[in-house]
Image (cartoon, rainbow, N blue to C red):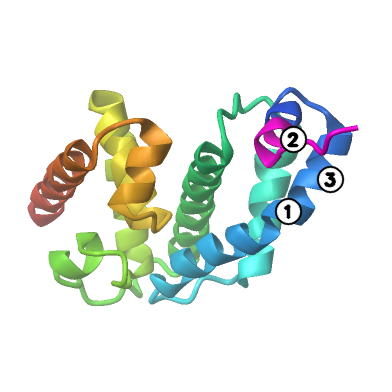
Amino acid sequence: MDPVSLTEQLQAFSAGDREAAEAVLRVILPKLHEIALRHLRKERYGAPVSPTELINEVWLRHMHKGGWHIKNRGHFYAIAGCAMRRVLVDFARNRLALKRGALEAPVLLEEAAGEPADTASAEQIVEIGLLMEKLGRTDPKTLRIVDLHYFAGFTFEEIAEITGLSQRQVRHLWEKGKDWLKERMTRT
């Protein structure tokens, strides 16, 4: 019997195959851990989870159910990175709800919507999360590029491979999305 590729396993997983889910999880954990670390390094407020806990939370909330229509491994990691962002936005919202009135001083926009190495406070994470939802309603393609680059930490080359766009198109959409976020963040 020929060994099954990771893409085939991911597709079986997305179709709801529970055995495939367990096999896939063992293979994908190192890359998921890397993506989780990228997310958590941006969190100035100190997300209340470790990379492993973030992966577990994403797995429990979203991934274990299947039904994701996964095309390939890059697409899977992109979806997982976006799910991590959503979980961290939820954590930030909950933290802010507990600390009403004790907000941190605002941080420059370049720090909140800049390159992937920057950190963000809980307020900025919630604000960016809300803005990302708005962006997704008006321009889902740009939203996806921002999610993949800023939140999941993929390079433009990796994003081009995942999306089928050219690197030039990816870079253009990234700049468009970053500018869109900066413009709206400065209004608040």
- SS at badge 1: helix
Along the line of sight, which residue is nearer the eye, 164 or 118? 164
Q: Which residue is mark 3?
A: 22
Question: Nearer the observer, disc 3 or disc 1?
Answer: 1
User: Residue 27 bears which disc, if any?
Assistant: 1
Residue drawn 24% across the image and 36% down it: 166
Dot 3 or dot 1, earlier in sequence? 3
Q: Quadrant of residue 101?
A: bottom left
Q: Are marks 2 and 1 in contact (CB under 8 Å)?
A: yes
- Please provide percent x and percent y for residue 180: 13, 43
- Please provide percent x and percent y for residue 34: 55, 66
Residue drawn 73% across the image and 53% down it: 27
The amino acid marked with disc number 3 is Glu
Q: Which residue is mark 2?
A: 9
> Farthest residue in the front direction?
2
The amino acid marked with disc number 1 is Val
Residue drawn 15% across the image and 66% down it: 110
Write the start and end of the magenta stretch as one range. 1-10
